[in-house]
Image: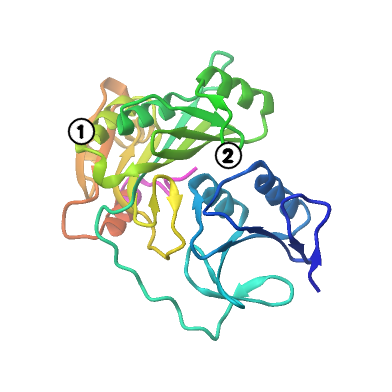
Amino acid sequence: MVQPVTWHPAADRATAETLVVEQDRNVVPLSTWVADAAATAAASDRVLQVLTQAHTRITYPLELLLAEAGAHWVVREGPERFRDGLSGFSLRWSGARFVTDLDAPPPEPVAPAPGSGDLEVQISTLHPASSSLELGSSTGAAIRALTGAEPAGWGVAEPVTQPWSPREVTAHCRQRAPSPTQVVVVGHGVLGQLRVDRVESGVLETIRLSGPAASSVAQDAVDTLVAEIAGTARSMIVAAHPGRLDGLRSPTPAPPALPYGILVGHPVLAERGIDHAQQAPASVRLVGRGTRQAAWCRLDSGGQRPYELLTAVLEHFGIVDASP
């Protein structure tokens, strides 16, 4: 039996298994209410399920939250007709939560045009723990390279409330340490998440950005970003996501982001050697100087598919996962 939820402002329905948040909007952001609903669901061993209309898009920060929380985007297609907003699989209400409808046919595969959708960038940087550490340099470098302007703002939810300030972002993360911290960052046509984790070897900073459109970003802009972060980044992956534009995810099912290139940072090259890096199964260019050289591996050349090349490059360098 579904009961109305009166103890949480964002949740419309609840069972022992789920909190359902209904949003009748054109764009659903990662609001403070939705973020708190996700935390409440996790604390009560429930799954958050965000229910929207068929035309609704969600922001990249909300998409990341759903993935990290094991939550679901449920799209209402008609009376008692639902599907997963990301995968496209049909869903049904089980009486306790929305579940995959195993009797429904699978969604038709989509073949988007190469390079369509948003450029997607993920940069991981491992810093020594220090009282002088200031976060945000990789965020600034990425947004400047891709848009030609500085980041516009940051906040704990959307819409962001603070102008961009590495000093204030650092102070916020330091105040919350050693707990992990995520903040939303925005730029011109760019949305993303900055995450900071205290790890055994230092402070891990990860920026994930979506936008601008991949077709609007010149090769020189990507090369500029590679050169600027080569001496500091642990890794960077650049891809194109056909299901997202201007940081907004369409409810139309789309395949995963198509990888374009991966930067393997200087710690790996210092361990494996330059000769080993140059033998990677991709188009490799060394960047940086001295002991801080990194390898920029392009995945858009050769006979293999980009996904296959990415897997081969990761195996070559002994990287289990490019994500933190």
Residues in magenta?
314-324
Labelled pair 2, 1 in contact (Cβ < 8 Å): no
Residue 79: percent from left, percent from top:
60, 77
Look at mark 2 in the image and give the residue it sits on: 158
Look at mark 1 in the image and give the residue it sits on: 220
Residue 318: percent from left, percent from top:
37, 47
Give the quadrant of the N terminus: bottom right
Amino acid type at image mark 2: Glu
Answer above or below: position of 189 versus 41. above
Membership of 159 in magenta stretch: no
Q: Nearer the viewer, residue 82 or 112?
A: 82
Q: Is residue 203 visible?
A: no
Q: Is residue 14 left or right of residue 230?
A: right
On the image, which quarter does residue 139 sit in? top left
N-term mark: 2 or 1: 2
Q: Residue furthest top?
A: 132
Q: Is residue 314 visible?
A: yes
Disc 2 residue crowd, few under 14, some 14–19, many 20+, Cα 10 Å: many
Q: Is residue 207 left or right of residue 173?
A: left
Answer above or below: position of 293 versus 319. above
Q: Nearer the viewer, residue 227 or 213?
A: 213
Q: Nearer the viewer, mark 2 or mark 1?
A: 2
Residue 128: percent from left, percent from top:
52, 22
Residue drawn at (46%, 45%), measured in percent from left and top? 323
